Amino acid sequence: MSAPLYNRDILALAVAAAEHLPNPDARYHASARAPLCGSRIILDLDTDDAGRVTSVGMHVEACALGQAAATLLARHAPGRGLDEIRAARDAIAGWFGGTGEAPGWPGFDLLAPARDYPARHGAILLPFDAAITALEEQAVRA
């Protein structure tokens, strides 16, 4: 029997997403939309001189899974650069697609029930897509 899609841990992470408000003073901004489900995110981030994330702000309009993924990104992106976040996104996508092992991103084991719901994968990847876009902007400006 599979685990319930929405459990207490996922809902707690989703509620925590509301704590990450946009940061209009951030240097890099990105927005992304998942076409299949319509989830949206506006992500603001700052980086240090080496291009590693120092702070994340966001506005998320997504299901609880997308909100939970956004919280996990915001909690664990600081100190990471473009290559690490891109690798994490690819590992998550592979895991959801059945071609890889569980990603090393902290907390993603809580989203394992979503592997059986491909329509939700875009919402879960959305925060990583937005972060990659923002970090690519940072790399161009550097």
Image (cartoon, rainbow, N blue to C red):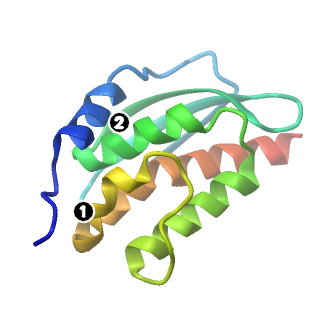
Foreground pick, 129 / 124: 124
Classify 34 as above or below 74: below
Numbered circle sitting on residue 8: none
Rendered image quadrant of residue 8 = top left
Residue drawn 45% across the image and 72% down it: 95
Label 1: which residue?
Answer: 113
**Would residue 33 be visible to someone looking at this image?**
no
In the image as oriented, which residue stretches furthest toward the bottom? 99
Who comes first in sequence, dot 2 or dot 1?
Answer: 2
Q: Are marks 2 and 1 in contact (CB under 8 Å)?
A: no
Q: Quadrant of the C terminus?
A: top right
- For badge 2, the amino acid type reads Val
Mark 2 neighbour density, 10 Å: few (under 14) some (14–19) many (20 or more): many
Secondary structure under the numbered disc 2 in the rendered image: strand
Query: Residue at position x 84%, y 40% from top?
Result: 141
Give amino acid for label 1. Answer: Pro
- Residue 42, image x, y percentages: 45, 36
Numbered disc total = 2
Image position of 107 (left or right of 128): left
Residue farthest along the top direction in this orientation: 25
Residue 106 is at least partly visible in this image: yes
- Residue plotted at (64% across, 52% down): 85
Q: Tell me if residue 98 comes above or below residue 12 in the rendering.
A: below
Where's residue 80, x and y in %? 71, 42
Q: Does residue 95 appear to the left or right of 135 in the view shown?
A: left
Q: Give the quadrant of the N terminus.
A: bottom left
86 is higher (above) or lower (below) than 40: below
Q: Where does label 2 land, which residue?
A: 60
